[in-house]
Each structure stands twice: as C-alpha cells, then as structure tokens.
Image (cartoon, helix red, strand yellow):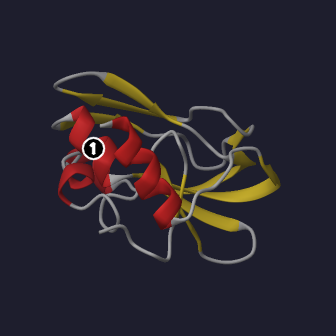
C-alpha cells in the first residue's frame, strides 16, 4: 500500500512536501525491490546546489548501480547520514527511516508528480 501523503515520479522516487519549499525525497518500495539489497549510498553534500533533473545520489545494490534524481532545482539542506552505516534502511523502510535527502526548492518542479493511484497504475503497467 502506497502512503497517501506522498507524491511519486516515474523514476520511482517519492516526495513529501514538509512546508512550502522543503521536500523530503526517497525511493519507492517498488524501486528498492527492483534494486535488491542496497549495499552503499553516495549522499550529496549539505549546501550543494542542484538543478532539476540532477542526480545527487547514487545507490549501489547487489544487482545494479542506480541514480536518484531531483525533481526541481534547489539546495540540499539535509541528508540521511544513517545511510552511511545502514544503507539497508532503504530496503527495510523506504518511506520512513530510509529517506535519502531534503531539498529546499528554488525552482519549479520539472518532473511530473503522480498521485498514489497514478503511480500504482504506472507500476502495474510495468509488470
């Protein structure tokens, strides 16, 4: 069951708007299942300014290396440093403890956001 308070992207990220300009970003349960056991997370630097569509995060798993994209331009204001020692949190708890980074949005969203229902339809079409 997808959390209803989140928005989703076709790149399998989830977003939680915590105030007007701040967004928490992680990957979906579907994405972590597809990747398999995540063994390493390369996090961005706090204060890093990124453009919409940039990939500030790299995930390494037993199956692949994958990127996590930013849906908008902004500044990285926090990273989940627990992932340095516990990358498996993304597998175990992708929507809570496994969040990846927070960004203060400074530009428009360039990635179309999907509701939980729209994202569910999208992933159902992939199988």
Q: Position of residue 64 (x, y in %)?
A: 27, 21
Q: Position of residue 124 (x, y in %)?
A: 35, 47
Q: Position of residue 83 (x, y in %)?
A: 30, 49
Q: Badge 1: few (under 14), some or many (20 or more) residues near its Cα, within 10 Å? A: many
* Residue 46 or residue 113, whichever sits in front: 113
The correct choice, above or below, for 37 with respect to 118 in the image is: above
In the picture, the quarter occupied by the N terminus is: bottom left
User: Residue at the location (66% across, 46% down)?
Assistant: 71
The correct choice, above or below, for 122 with respect to 66 in the image is: below
The answer, for residue 79, to whether it is visible in the render is no
User: Residue at the location (47% across, 65% down)?
Assistant: 116
The answer, for residue 12, to whether it is visible in the render is yes
Q: Residue furthest top?
A: 64
Total marks shown come to 1
Secondary structure under the numbered disc 1 in the rendered image: helix
Q: Badge 1 is on which residue?
A: 32
Q: Position of residue 109 (x, y in %)?
A: 76, 51
The correct choice, above or below, for 88 with respect to 40 in the image is: below
User: Residue at the location (75% across, 37% down)?
Assistant: 51
Is 19 displayed left or right of 125 in the figure?
right
Tell me where residue 45 sits by quadrant. Answer: top right
Tell me where residue 127 sits by quadrant. Answer: top left
Is 35 displayed left or right of 56 in the figure?
left
Q: Residue furthest right?
A: 107
């Amino acid at each position: 069951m997808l959390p209803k308070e989140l928005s989703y992207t076709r790149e399998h990220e989830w977003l939680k708007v915590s105030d007007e300009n701040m967004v928490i970003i992680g990957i979906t349960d579907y994405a972590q299942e597809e990747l398999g056991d995540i063994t390493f997370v390369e996090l961005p630097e706090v204060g890093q300014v990124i453009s919409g569509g940039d990939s500030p995060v790299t995930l390494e798993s037993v199956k692949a290396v994958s990127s996590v994209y930013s849906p908008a331009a902004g500044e990285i204001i926090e990273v989940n440093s627990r992932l340095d020692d516990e990358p498996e949190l993304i597998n175990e708890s992708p929507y809570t403890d496994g969040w990846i980074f927070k960004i203060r949005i400074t530009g428009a969203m360039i990635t179309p956001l999907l509701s939980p229902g729209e994202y569910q339809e999208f992933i159902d079409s992939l199988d």
